[in-house]
Amino acid sequence: MKTENLKCLAFPSGPLETNTYLVHSEAGDAAIVDPVELNSALFTKINELKLIVRALLITHTHVDHIYSISEYASKFNVPVYMHSAAEKMRDFYTESCEMLGFGSNTMPKEYFACDRLETIQFGQSKLSVITSPGHSPCGIMYMADDFIITGDTLFKGSIGRYDLHLASLPLLYQSLKKLAPFQDDVKIYPGHGPSTTLGYERKTNHFLQACKG
């Protein structure tokens, strides 16, 4: 199983411009990360590249990241992977649907707990799993050889909010420290906003500097 030569394409979606990611290999295996809404540009790209979607991966279960997950799971008939701490977030998810202007919805009950896995295989490819609580107790980052999808743990120039339900700044700093072993040229694909590199964030992001991640 391979992580090399994986490509990651961003499709900003939803009212908060969440980055839904399409990760795919040259062989045509694909995974979708954080499917917040049905996205025609994403579906067009899947068809254009003749990809086979094999998994749905969730960085955390805030509504602006997973609102359309059940529709995606049905459309592609694939497994869902998210952190088991999502169970702590069910009531907050339901409340957030109304607060953020989404329609009434519930978090899916059927999923694989990826915090118990070291890697997630999709076809002949794989991504490594890095647990990253702090912004949410169910935070996960997904890593290939040359990029990391950080969700709302790390943004270009900032980090995720730590004033939300069950968020914790100390835990967020501990999660950022998990980035310390990786090289500066590793690309960072955040949950919102533009991509960056780990080296750039080490030079400019005072949150990352504070924890020496």
Image (spheres, rainbow, N blue to C red):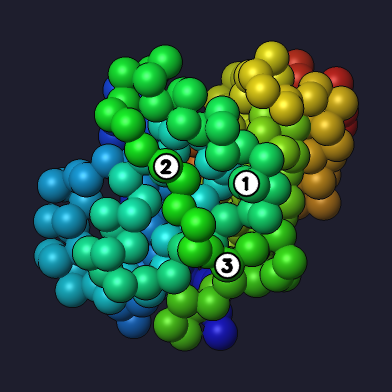
Percent x, y of residue 34: 43, 46
Mark 1 belongs to which amino acid? Ala
- Label 2: few (<14), some or many (≥20) within 10 Å? some
Percent x, y of residue 8: 41, 55
Q: Secondary structure at mark 2?
A: loop
Disc nearest the viewer among 2 and 3? 2
Percent x, y of residue 25: 39, 73
Q: Quadrant of residue 184?
A: top right
Is 126 situated above or below 92? below
Q: Does label 2 or label 1 sit earlier along the sequence?
A: 1
- Label 1: few (<14), some or many (≥20) within 10 Å? many
Q: At 85% across and 36% down in the image, what residue appears?
A: 174
Q: Specify the label residue 112 is tagged with.
A: 3
Percent x, y of residue 137: 72, 38
Q: Does label 3 or label 1 sit earlier along the sequence?
A: 1
Mark 3 belongs to which amino acid? Phe
Q: Is residue 196 visible?
A: no
Q: Quadrant of residue 130?
A: bottom right
Q: Which residue is mark 2?
A: 106
Q: Nearer the viewer, residue 42 or 138?
A: 138
Q: Tell me how far mark 2 sits from mark 3, CA to CA.
A: 17 Å
Q: Secondary structure at mark 3?
A: strand
Q: Tell me how far mark 2 sits from mark 1, CA to CA.
A: 12 Å
Label 3 near label 2: C-beta < 8 Å?
no
Q: Which residue is mark 1?
A: 86
Q: At 13% across and 65% down in the image, what residue appears?
A: 48
